[in-house]
Image: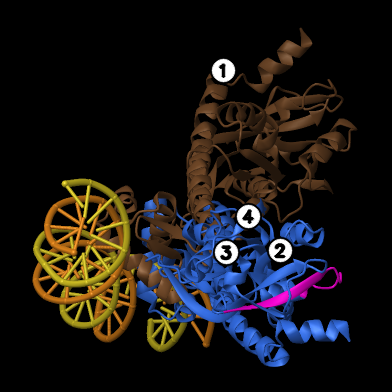
Chain colours: A brown, B blue, C yellow, D orange
Amino acid sequence: MELRQIHYFIALATHQNFSRAAEHVHVSQPSLSVQIGGLEKELGTRLFDRLGRKVILTQAGELFRVHAERALRELEQAAQVVHELHGAKRGRLVVGVLSTVNSYLIAPLVSRFKQRFPDIQLQVHAQPSSEVVSGLLANRLDIGICLLPLAHPQLTTVPLFEERLALVAPVGMRIGKRRTRMQDLAPLPLVLMPVDYCLRKMVEAECAKAGVHPQVVLEMSSPEGILQAVAQGTGATILPELYVRSRLSGGDLQLIDLYDPTPRHAVGLAYLTKRYRNLAAEEFAQLCQTTMKELQSDSKQPTASKIRARRAG
Amino acid sequence: MELRQIHYFIALATHQNFSRAAEHVHVSQPSLSVQIGGLEKELGTRLFDRLGRKVILTQAGELFRVHAERALRELEQAAQVVHELHGAKRGRLVVGVLSTVNSYLIAPLVSRFKQRFPDIQLQVHAQPSSEVVSGLLANRLDIGICLLPLAHPQLTTVPLFEERLALVAPVGMRIGKRRTRMQDLAPLPLVLMPVDYCLRKMVEAECAKAGVHPQVVLEMSSPEGILQAVAQGTGATILPELYVRSRLSGGDLQLIDLYDPTPRHAVGLAYLTKRYRNLAAEEFAQLCQTTMKELQSDSKQPTASKIRARRAG
DNA sequence: ATATTCGATAGTCTTTACCTATACCGTGGC
DNA sequence: GCCACGGTATAGGTAAAGACTATCGAATAT
């Protein structure tokens, strides 16, 4: 059974005339005749009665027609849904976002995306960078935002921006200056992520470069929890500056720039290189970059010292 | 879009591996690869992500699959219903039967047919012969039982048997003998069908041959009505003997053989020559013939005189 | 590092669907 | 009753398309 035969069959059933039906499907009358004949032969039954003047369906033909039309309709729909997906008129986009980045980037991002693609079902998972990566590899995520560099051969990455890390301490803790050298971290009690987290490794690496050994008094896996612990005076911590700023409303935390050197890490998009990215995914990636640029130019990166000045004034 | 592509697509979606899928649809791996590629190109979207080890559906592929599978299922069903019809496991058979014949032939016929084909929906219309013919020509009927000969070029006829016509009179009417010559009909008041009916024409032709002019006192279109009028003494009538016998229970009618000559007409099957006849129709035609033969051998055609003798005894 | 699995591509061949021309049948008009 | 016409089936030649074998290239597993 060929799709061609089904199309010809429907045309003939509709026009009840081989020549007219043939015109409508843009073939010659003999071609249509042969195809209909082939279909009837395959089914072992006449589908049409050739009654001199008119050609009309047999009972078998009528039964066949019902299902044949449904089949064609389904195939049309199959193509339709794909085209709608391609035009981002429908579909689902699953994004994994590094928890800290999630806090300040995602809100404006999803609002813009929803505006542009109201019919795409967007799913955002705030996760540690490692889970974003494993989610991408397991094909659970369409796209990810995580820390760079990412030396995985199956993943393609697109740098978005760099995050500066800054020191966060309870207001009561005496740090001395608005800016602190890395090496001055040595005496501070620190609350950090567990050792298997990228951020922790990053901090340790920076400390090593500065020749200091951090005193970790508490490990917590969520940056949110860490900030709470710091606010209660458990110790200081080191977190992305932008993230902390978005959480700095309580008034019980102070943000102190680090330098010599300023620890920073790159954040970027990642996706499976071989995976097909539909329009929605491509546009989301684009939006990430433009949104981030606007965020940076908006705030012109006021330093931690300026923030403290503002809060004091 | 080709049906082949849909089949390959489903196979690949199922096995997630080009080579395996190719085996299952009995083609080489490159053939399947090309067809899938063609389908994706036509849809303008990747349907599968080729991820090293496994091949899995993209979101577009998943959407496409839903409808593609439904389409294939519909086509399977289309073939299925046709095959069931062909095997007479379903379907409908519309039969037009000459009213008089209907009374005695149809009961045993439908009972046998229903036994043999319980799932065929049988529709029997008792009609005058002319309507059976027009019904066949208009393709409203699958098969007809009507008077022969039938000189219509589009119709094929199969003789079944001959019906003898007999005189029916109210018991009070003095006819004189158990058999009556055609020419003796002259003085009798007759109740006959309207002139456009075959049976009426037949009677008139026989009368003309016998050189008599019938006195028609009443015309009625239904044989049932005619018998009632006769029973009430309105006059005598001429009807098929077998038909009258099946209605002879009241005791107020006498059946008298006609001879010199005995009027008789042929009854047979008819159907559109070009029309396709499925198994159910063919079997119905067969059953007509065998049932009729059995009816004839059963009763051994007792004459009207014998019947009257029986009733008298 | 090497071997193996797996998908894509190139080239050749076979199949098949298309077209034109024509035969055949039935119908309707003259 | 004969002829013409509308309409479908058939025949023969051509061109497109699918299938196959061989091979490449990439990625994974040993």
Label 1 vs label 4: CA separation?
A: 110 Å
Regarding residue A125, the answer to whether it shows in the image is yes
The reply to whether the C-beta atoms of the residues labelled 2 and 4 are less than 8 Å apart is no
Chain ID of residue with mark 1: A
- Residue under circle 1? A298
Q: CB under 8 Å between callouts 1 and 3?
A: no
The reply to the same-chain question for discs 1 and 4 is no
Q: Chain of mark 4?
A: B
| Residue type of the residue flagged with mark 2 | Ala
Q: Please tell me how crowded label 3 is: few (under 14), some (14-19), or many (20+) other residues with Cα within 10 Å.
A: many
| Real-space CA distance between mark 2 and mark 3, rounded to the nearest whole angstrom | 15 Å
Q: Residues within 10 Å of mark 1 (few under 14, many from 20)?
A: few
Q: Nearer the viewer, mark 3 or mark 4?
A: 4
Q: Secondary structure at mark 2?
A: loop
What residue does disc 4 label? Answer: B216
Q: Which mark is residue B236?
A: 2
Which one is in front in this view, the residue at disc 1 or the one at disc 4? 4
Chain part drawn in magenta: B246-259
**Front of the two marks 1 and 3:** 3
Kindly indicate the quadrant of the structure image that contains residue B287: bottom right
Question: Could you tell me which quadrant the C terminus of chain B lies in?
Answer: bottom right
Residue under disc 2 on the same chain as residue under disc 1: no
What residue is pinned by disc 3? B199
Near-viewer residue (B71 or A37) = A37
Identity of the amino acid at label 4? Val
Disc on the earlier residue, 3 or 4: 3
Near-viewer residue (D13 or A289): D13
